[in-house]
Amino acid sequence: MSLRRLESIFEEFSFIHGNVFVLLVSWVLMNFAGHMPDTYYSLYVLELGGTPMSVGVISFSYMIALASVQFLGGYLADSYGRKRLVVTMTFALALSYLLYAFAFSWEVILVGAVLQGLFLVYQPALWAIMADSLPPERRGVGYALSQLVGVFSIASPIVAGCIVGWAGLLTGMRVMYMATVMAYLTAAVLRFRLRETLKPDAGRPGVFEVLRSYPRAVRESFTVLKVLPRTVLNLSVVYVVFHMFSWMCMQYYVIYATKFLGVSEEFWALLSAVWFASMYASTLPVGKLVDVVGRVAPLLASMPLTAVATWMFIKGGSVLLLTSFVVNGIATTMFSNAYQSLQTDLVAAEYRGRVIGFTNFFAYVFGAIGGFVGGYLYEHVHPSVPFMLLMVSQAPLLVFSVLSVREPKVREE
């Protein structure tokens, strides 16, 4: 490899230092550990006495809790800064997994899920600090790397399958959740090294001050939309709708595959690994594509790909399932990377926390509705109906996106 080629590579990734480096390393730890129990999460709920509808209730409660703190999270991120919120809540999130590890019924999982939703008040601050730390010309690659660190998660389902095969589903899940606690605690300690990217408007808020801030946070999150391009609102609508139909199915893939299609737990672990592998293998090429051809085209392309992948999953069969998970992984990467890059391009740094909070609020509310409706449809109508709705929804979403989402003439710093 020539010296000039090496210099080009170093220049391409020269932004990986400071905050970006700390976040990437912490995500490696959290993704690898967290995706192990995620592999069999819904089956764990069933093992603890739940039903598919119970999975929907947990999903609904988690998303509503998550939605309830998004305005506040965005407001705190823009008013008091990002770092303190990220570090404190990462510790809280780590400890919440103890409830999952020692759960004796699905209702305990419900409590843990609600707490986790509340602790994720730091999400707007987390993505704002990432956005602030990326140079405009490297955002596509930067967000691609934030996804690519999950490449270590390719092994997570395989490890999970081995643990479940060795210890059984119940004990194996408890072991994996304890590993998740340790990984999240380590990530929380690492995040002490983050550097604040926004000068706070006020000092450290007290508990009562934070609670009093909530109405103002909601008002400012709506007010800020008046100074932003119309495309920001249109893009938010696309994200919310996509999120709702995705969550309608999210927790039921493993149940549908194992209980309806007859897939073994071992083959499910392989399918999960294939999904991660395809998603992360496409991450850098997609990131580069987003930087070169623009954000909108990959965003649009992700929708028909999602529809095709969902159709193949519904049909079942080893070949179609494997192909489905490959296509779905690529579509997920395209949508996520293009959406995040486009939102950052359109929104000035001082508004990002509130815009992220605004968008996440509605995404989580409608995601909660989607998860609950998905559970009802799965249990009381037919297991394939949630997936059919996800597939069909991509057509009108594509038309709306073509008509209403535009590239900015000038990208925000």
Image (tube, rainbow, N blue to C red):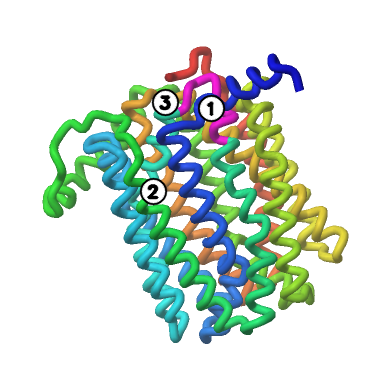
Residues at marks 3 and 2, CA–CA distance in whole angstroms:
28 Å
Q: Position of residue 247 (x, y in %)?
A: 56, 57
Q: Position of residue 100 (x, y in %)?
A: 44, 74
Image depth: mark 3 or mark 2 in front? 2
Using the image as rendered, state which of residue 138 and residue 376 is in the foreground.
138
Q: Residue at x 60, y 54 (%)?
A: 246
Q: Give the magenta part as a residue range.
A: 134-143
Residue 159 vertical position relative to residue 186 in the rendered view, above or below:
below
Q: Are marks 3 and 2 in contact (CB under 8 Å)?
A: no
Judging depth in this view, the residue of 69 and 330 nearest the camera is 330
Q: Residue at x 50, y 39 (%)?
A: 237
- Give the residue type that dot 1 points to: Arg
Q: Quickly name the residue at label 2.
A: 190
Q: Which mark is residue 139?
A: 1
Tell which of 336 and 97 is nearer to you: 97
Please report contact status of discs 2 and 1: CB closer than 8 Å, yes or no: no
